Image (cartoon, rainbow, N blue to C red):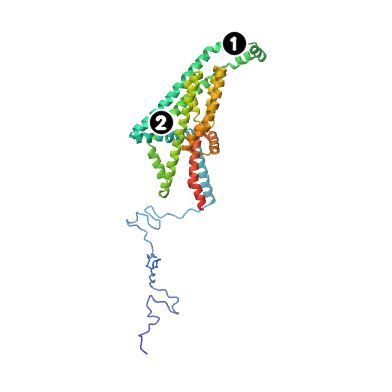
């Protein structure tokens, strides 16, 4: 039998060999190097270091390293979640939420003006795009659209103010005659003597009543100037939004993650297109109603036909109830002029509203925004209750946008589950 060489004893065993039965308490001087792990392809993967981590960065400790230390020191242990800390954090959150609520409530008026300006800018942007397609520069296109809007507003004001001033002056001039006719009326005199109305009027005409009346006059002036200021604010904001429309749109899309940005862009552009189409359709229907009213007023001899046409066109922009409101105003003027004229006004608007509701409105609006009639009615009522006339104006475009998101996003997601 050949000699295989000397056998190593327990004392001469190599440092990296496994310990024998009698070396259970002996620790190896050097730990064996770990074998590299194999990945899925059978190749050796990266070796994970098990030694101590260097606490200094490549610049001598000024950069953060793996264990969280930096030139400002090592972060301490996290705070214990005591009941006091949890309660204090909750109270701070509630206080912050209430502060935000107060801020939004106080800024409600400005936010409504911003929403109106955005809505008008979205509706007027197709006109800017059309002018750009004709070779007009962007600034000139915005200026043309803004100037057209200003001219239309000025035309409406000049159409409404003179009749109001004229009728008010005539009423003041005829007021003594009205009072004299009432004084000669036996029934009125009997009521004055029975309820002692003269003494009631004299007792009411004191300093407090005069002060309240003066306050009412000042309040009316404040209302007029406030309305003018809000109108100018909306106009200026609309012009700015038109000028920077593309930048604002791209900024909104850039807030979306890159993986979903293209789909959000397509859906968002479709929503903007529907809102613009709704505005164009609504303006077309309103202009048609105003022209029809103007022609009818000239035929039957109504006073101030252009002013009445402007009133009908403006009120016709309000969904659901606007056309009826304009018809009532013109019919009242007709009845005040002559009874047959008032009856003719009522019959005309009754027929015209049927034609508009069943022929004109569906033909124009279904091409731009296909909105369920029940959903449009509910949205208009909710919009009026929340934001008044402004809510009624933006109700139908909001429903169209919601229907698009529901059809393209929510329903497919539910079907894929």
Q: Under tag 1, what secondary structure?
A: helix
x, y percent for residue 372: 53, 39
Identified at 43% across, 23% down, the residue is 155
Q: Which residue is mark 1?
A: 181
Q: Which residue is mark 2?
A: 236
Q: Residue furthest right?
A: 194
Pointers 2 and 1 in contact (C-beta within 8 Å): no
**Mark 1, other Cα within 10 Å: few <14 / some 14–19 / many ≥20:** few
Residue situated in front as seen by the camera: 220 or 140:
140
Q: Under tag 2, what secondary structure?
A: helix
Q: Which numbered dot is residue 233? A: none
x, y percent for residue 401: 48, 41
**Mark 2, other Cα within 10 Å: few <14 / some 14–19 / many ≥20:** some
x, y percent for residue 88: 52, 47
Picture quadrant of residue 8 = bottom left
Picture quadrant of residue 159 = top left
| Image-based side of 151 in relation to 214, left or right | left
Identified at 40% across, 35% down, the residue is 126
Question: Can residue 99 be seen by looking at this rendering?
Answer: no
Residue situated in front as seen by the camera: 55 or 249:
249
């Amino acid at each position: 039998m050949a000699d295989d060489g000397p056998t190593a004893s327990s004392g001469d065993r190599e440092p990296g060999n496994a310990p024998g039965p009698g070396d259970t308490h002996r620790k190896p001087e050097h730990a064996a190097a770990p074998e590299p792990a194999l990945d899925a392809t059978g190749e050796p993967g990266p070796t994970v270091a098990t030694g101590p981590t260097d606490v200094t960065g490549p610049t001598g400790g000024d950069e953060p390293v793996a264990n969280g230390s930096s030139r400002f020191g090592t972060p301490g242990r996290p705070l214990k979640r005591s009941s006091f800390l949890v309660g204090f954090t909750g109270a701070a959150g509630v206080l912050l939420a209430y502060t935000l609520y107060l801020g939004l409530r106080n800024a409600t008026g400005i936010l409504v003006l911003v929403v109106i300006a955005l809505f008008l800018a979205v509706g007027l942007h197709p006109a800017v795009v059309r002018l750009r397609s004709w070779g007009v520069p962007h600034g000139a296109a915005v200026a043309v659209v803004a100037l057209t809007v200003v001219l239309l507003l000025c035309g409406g004001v000049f159409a409404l103010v003179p009749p109001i001033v004229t009728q008010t002056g005539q009423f003041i001039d005829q007021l003594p005659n009205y009072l004299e006719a009432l004084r000669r009326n036996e029934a009125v005199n009997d009521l004055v003597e029975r309820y002692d109305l003269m003494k009631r009027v004299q007792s009411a005409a004191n300093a407090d009543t005069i002060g309240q009346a003066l306050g009412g006059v000042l309040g009316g002036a404040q209302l007029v100037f406030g309305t003018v200021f809000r109108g100018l604010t909306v106009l200026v904001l609309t012009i700015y939004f038109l000028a920077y429309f593309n930048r604002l749109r791209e900024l909104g899309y850039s807030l979306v993650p890159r993986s979903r940005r293209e789909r959000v862009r397509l859906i968002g552009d479709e929503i903007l297109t529907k809102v613009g189409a709704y505005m164009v359709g609504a303006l077309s229907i309103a202009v048609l109603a105003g022209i029809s009213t103007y022609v009818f007023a000239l035929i039957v001899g109504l006073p101030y036909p252009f002013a009445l046409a402007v009133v009908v066109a403006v009120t016709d922009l309000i969904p659901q109830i606007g056309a009826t409101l304009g018809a009532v105003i013109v019919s009242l003027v007709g009845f005040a002029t002559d009874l047959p004229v008032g009856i003719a006004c009522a019959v005309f608007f009754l027929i015209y509203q049927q034609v508009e509701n069943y022929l004109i409105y569906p033909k124009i609006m279904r091409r731009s925004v296909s909105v369920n009639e029940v959903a449009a009615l509910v949205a208009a009522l909710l919009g009026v209750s929340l934001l008044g006339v402004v809510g009624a104006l933006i109700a139908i475009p909001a429903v169209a946008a919601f229907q698009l998101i529901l059809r393209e996003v929510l329903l497919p997601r539910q079907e894929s589950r």
